[in-house]
Image: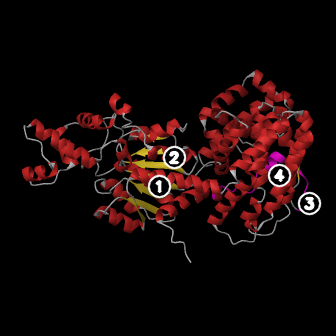
Amino acid sequence: MPLNLDPATQCAFSICENKGVFALLLGSGISRAASIPTGWEITLDLVRRVALARGVDAQPDWAAWYRAETGENPNYSDLLEELGASPDERRAIIHRYIEPTAEDREQNKKVPTEAHRSIAKIVAAGHIRVIVTTNFDRLVETALRELGVEPTVITSMDVLRGAEPLTHSACYVLKLHGDYKDARILNTEAELSGYPAEYDALLDRIFDEFGLIICGWSGEWDHALKAAMMRAPNRRYSVFWAARGAIGTAADELIRHRRARIIPIDSADTFISKLGAQVEALEASQRENPLSIDLLIASAKRFLSKPEHRIQLDELFSDQTNRLLKELDGPDFAVSHQWAPDVFRRRVIRYEATTEALARMLGVIGRWGPDEHHTLVVEIIRSLVRHANLERNGINGYVNLRAYPAILAWTAYGLGLVRSSRLAKLHDLFVSSVERPFQQEPKRAVEQLYIWEGAEEGIWREIEGARYHSAFSHHLIGLFSGWSDSFIGLTSSFPAAIATFETLASLSVFERESLATAQAALASESFSWMPIGHTTFDNSSMRPLLAELVTTEGKQKLIDAGFAHGNPDFIDLFLQNRGRVVGRMQFGG
């Protein structure tokens, strides 16, 4: 018997199971609970203020008064155009409805609501990356920044031309009508009748590549936005339309065209808040019991704190590794299953949930463990690789994914080593040998696990919902930004740690070249291919690291740890080679 799931629950499942695939389209209704009026409410208030200025007595129904006076319904666009002759004047009119006063702040008005904070949590967890809004306020941006998410905010054509590309942004906020502090906001019907070609192209891409969750938007006034939605040909992902009360004519046309699922709601605020809670609950249900994970991590830390607990520590890791290997033999991971992208996504989530405890424990031992435990960790990683290689017949995507737990374990331990500045052990980890399938000769771990045949760009770009450089790396960064709190510590330390890990892994891959062959390739305007990771495109994380790598002290630190064949000139060659790889990726060569 079917469960007859309500569309709101279906929406939460879609968000959770298709991480990064859905975009939000937000209208003025999303900010109503923050006491920021909707366009209709502003219209009636403008009618009231104009009438009172003309000496008209207070009316119980200002809309009715306006109709009696003019023979027409009050129109937001017409009123603003009449009251404000220039964009600056219209901006000033709108400003007072949005900017909070000291009294507003005391009463918790015109500040982010639970809905805005729920949106920020969903974004921070990596489920949503793109937000399109017709609102002038900054409540979404404020809520995002409160959680440490710095969005790319597009408010005008000038900003768009100089902004970080959509594919490289952790959160992309497109404010179609502008920002209330900018005179270039779009208010009147004439201003809203069409967008610049660049905006249309961006909207076409978003509506084609992403699923859509619409909330607080009526579809009645924004003709250019409605036209963009009508143009979109692709329906690969669902559209959910949260609607309060009766559906208007414009909305009904869009709903039928996009085959959207209607979610009846009492208010935008309650819907978004509930949606955030559902997504959080669904994500938690995919993990092991968080309490058991926390207990295992606490046990690892406790055993590490005293040398006499070495035996208990070994037993703890052995037990957890054996438990993981047993679970990986379960039917959830059968490689003969028929190929389907949704199955692949769910399998990725299952692998992550099953491996999380051990991976985070390895991060702990990387951060705080003595060097003598390095051999134990390498053997655990090798055992996961051996298990992955036991099955090589089946659907390639599923076969290759069997090594994913080894990737997670290897990355977690490496990040822990980076955080504790144990660079010599990090290099040992990169160059340690691991088995290859079909009795091939062993290979350096960095060439088997960092260069992983399961990281097919097409598959991982589909999971991430956009065209990323190094899409698998981007996925790992999102995952470990949550996992690493138990061994990285401060959230602010994570970007530098992941950037260092990826860069030094790339350097270790480059070490397969000798000094002479690297010089020859670069002298001939060629380069040696190597993975460079997603953090390459994060200037804020990479800038200080690259600055250190060109200093004598920075080079010597790597030489002392065993990197770069013991030659500082090799680091210069690596940086030159890296620049060419980045250039080739950026320009599609």
Contact? badges 2 and 4 (CB < 8 Å): no
Distance from disc 2 to disc 1, alpha carbons, whole Å, reads 10 Å
Mark 3 vs mark 4: in front: 4
Q: Report which residue position mark 2 lands on.
A: 166
Query: In the image, what residue occupies the spot 70% across and 53% down?
Result: 289
Q: Which residues are magenta?
A: 438-458
Distance from disc 1 to disc 4, alpha carbons, whole Å, reads 45 Å
Distance from disc 3 to disc 4, alpha carbons, whole Å, reads 27 Å
Let me know if residue 72 appears in the view. yes
Q: Report which residue position mark 3 lands on.
A: 439
Mark 3: secondary structure: loop
Residue 452 covered by magenta stretch: yes
Determine which of the numbered discs, if any, sits on residue 320 in the image.
4
Mark 2 vs mark 4: in front: 4
Query: In the image, what residue occupies the spot 57% across and 57% down?
Result: 16
Distance from disc 2 to disc 4, alpha carbons, whole Å, reads 40 Å
Q: Earlier in the sequence, mark 3 or mark 1?
A: 1
Residue 10 point in image, percent of width and height: 51, 64
Contact? badges 3 and 4 (CB < 8 Å): no
Residue 469 point in image, percent of width and height: 62, 48
Residue 283 point in image, percent of width and height: 61, 54
Task: Determine whether 321 is above or below 563 in the image.
Answer: below
Determine which of the numbered discs, if any, sits on residue 281 in the image.
none
Q: Residues within 10 Å of mark 1 (few under 14, many from 20)?
A: some
Determine which of the numbered discs, if any, sits on residue 205 in the image.
1
Amino acid type, mark 2: Leu
Amino acid type, mark 1: Arg
Q: Residues within 10 Å of mark 4 (few under 14, many from 20)?
A: some
Task: Determine whether 563 is above or below 289 in the image.
Answer: above
Q: Earlier in the sequence, mark 2 or mark 4?
A: 2
